[in-house]
Image (spheres, grey):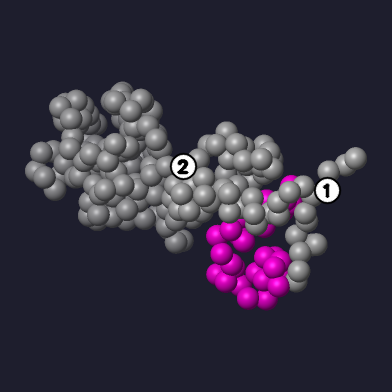
Amino acid sequence: MQEHKYSIKEWAKDDRPREKLLTKGAESLSDSELLAILIHNGSKEKTAVDLAKEILKLGKDNLVELGKLSLTDLMKIKGIGEAKAITIAAALELGRRRQSAAPLGKPVMQTSGDIADYLKTKLKDYRHEVFAVLYLNRANKINHFEIISEGGITGTVADPRVILRRALEKDAVNIILCHNHPSGSLKPSRADEQLTVKIKEAAKFLDIAVLDHVIVSEDGHFSFADEGIL
């Protein structure tokens, strides 16, 4: 006997999130209703909204935490297969990219706060440490953002040759080094300081300036330039 799945079409009209979105706008929907639209069909025992509520619970009822879940995590919920998990992950990634995108142009980095806000959006969902670089033009607008390397919880390694070669490819005259601290600590390590000096000295030979090295975590940010140690 084929398993019956609850379709959104079968719900009472007032409970249909698609119709609600059409008549009242997307902002009127709860997080679970928006997720239910992505899930589309429920399982034999649960509606799509029920499954959506389980997914949110798995993410501690917080969209930031939800964005950190892997496909495997999502598929632990009975009724969420690979296709549904991929759809949810894709939607979360689009939201992340929209948040970090600049409206009709390249974002300008003027302060360490600007840098930190941009980086938090880019790096907040990584559970391990990653090292990235912002490549800027003469107006300090971002030409390119790239994660150079990924490491374990204890640290990561960035090759200055890779960083500077990419700077030349992207016509960057200034660069900003950055990495995250998933542990929440903002204190730079001795290795962080040594790597910063190494890249700064190497960049001088190519007339490329290292403007800052910014560490971000959920608790805030640390700027080498602001602290006068660059």
Label 1 CA crowd tier, 10 Å (few <14, some 14–19, many 20+): few
Left or right of 133: which side holds 85? right
Residue at image x 65%, y 69%? 21
Q: Amino acid at mark 2?
A: Lys
How many numbered discs, if any?
Answer: 2
* Image spot of residue 138 (x, y percent): 28, 49
Within the image, what quadrant is residue 26 found in?
A: bottom right
Q: Which region shows up in magenta? A: 14-43
Q: Nearer the viewer, mark 1 or mark 2?
A: 1
Residue pushed farthest front? 45
Within the image, what quadrant is residue 114 found in?
A: bottom left
Residue 135 counted in the magenta span: no
Vertical position of residue 79 compared to residue 109: above or below: above
* Image spot of residue 101 (x, y percent): 44, 54
Mark 2: which secondary structure? loop
Vertical position of residue 194 compared to residue 13: above or below: above
Residue at image x 71%, y 72%? 14
Disc 2 designates what residue?
A: 68
Give the spatial CA distance, label 1 vs label 2: 31 Å
Left or right of 80: which side holds 165? left
Residue at image x 75%, y 60%? 8
Out of 168 and 182, give the one closest to the viewer.
182
Q: Residue 4 — which label?
A: 1
Q: Amino acid at mark 1?
A: His
The answer to whether any part of residue 2 appears in the image is yes
Magenta-highlighted stretch: main secondary structure? Answer: helix
* Image spot of residue 68 (x, y percent): 46, 42
